Amino acid sequence: MSRTFRYIAVSFLLSCCAVDALSNSSDCLSVYEARNAYSVAYEKLWKRELFVTPGDIARFVSLPGNVSEEYAVSVYRSSDGSHSITITRALSPLYEAVPSRARKRTVDSSRIKIFRQDCSLPSRTATILHRVWLRALQRTQPETIDPGIIWLDSSKEIFSTIDGRGRTLWGQMPHEIGEQGKMAKLFELPTLLIKYCDISDPGKKKALAAEIERRCNILLGRLEKEGCHGRQEGQN
């Protein structure tokens, strides 16, 4: 599992480097919505299969197109006040079960197995994660795509959380982001959560939780000070 996630993370960051020089790139999440019948059917399927626990603290969904399988990272608060992470990953692509004009034959979605992994998370770590997700998702913007650019990458990286009013907020990575931008740093966090669940040594687990909190605090400071194009709020 870790090898697959590592491949996706490296591929994503390499794409960041390729567009880092584009001056019009936005450093905020884009508005997410399923825009056609295929996307609506696909969304219904991946939510049903991957959302097996709540994601009220923080949720991340990777839809890697035809590169790999879909997966989700969900952080949630249990009824007893503790916090947990659930990782779910399709063992074969879910999109192959969704009919489309390009796909005359589909697989039976009931035959697609889902890998699941659960682990506990310190409440302090969960709290700062929620603050980061909430701040990032409160700043989503419609993405303006240059009609002269043809994007070969069909992947989507989707974030969600629940705000204080019980509303689910959604957003997705824009096509153009900088390697050192806020969105690249945001994308690193789900990968660290997966790594955290993989660790069995308590000491190493505690150290990684502290590192996640450190990165969250830095990112939260940037999210609160910087605009969507890297300038501080209020600057022209």
Image (cartoon, helix red, strand yellow):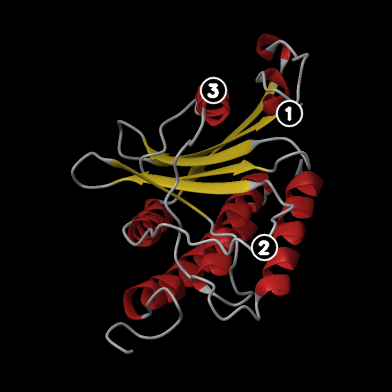
Which residue bears the numbered disc 1?
A: 93
- Residue 101 image offset from top left, x and y in percent: 70, 23
Where in the figure is residue 221, as x and y percent of width and height? Answer: 37, 77
> Could you say which quadrant of the image residue 39 lies in?
top right
Mark 3 lies on residue: 41
* Rendered residue at 30%/30% (across/down): 79
The amino acid sitting under disc 3 is: Ala
Q: Is residue 223 above or below residue 232?
A: above
Query: Which residue is denoted by mark 2 in the rendering?
Result: 149
Q: Amino acid at mark 2?
A: Ile
Q: Identify which residue, 117 or 99, lies in the foreground.
A: 99
Q: Earlier in the sequence, mark 2 or mark 1?
A: 1
Q: Up-down: is 16 above or below 222?
A: above
Picture quadrant of residue 167: top left
Specify which label sits upstream in the sequence, 3 or 1: 3
Neighbor class of circle 1 (other Cα within 10 Å; few <14, some 14-19, many 20+) is: many
Q: Residue at x 32, y 74 (%)?
A: 224
First in sequence: mark 2 vs mark 3:
3
Q: How many numbered marks have been drawn onto this rendered protein structure?
A: 3
Comparing labels 2 and 3, the label whose residue is closer to the camera:
2
Front-most of 207 and 4? 4
User: Which structural element holds mark 3?
Assistant: helix
Comparing labels 3 and 1, the label whose residue is closer to the camera: 3
Q: Callout 1: helix, strand or loop?
A: loop
Q: Nearer the viewer, mark 2 or mark 1?
A: 2
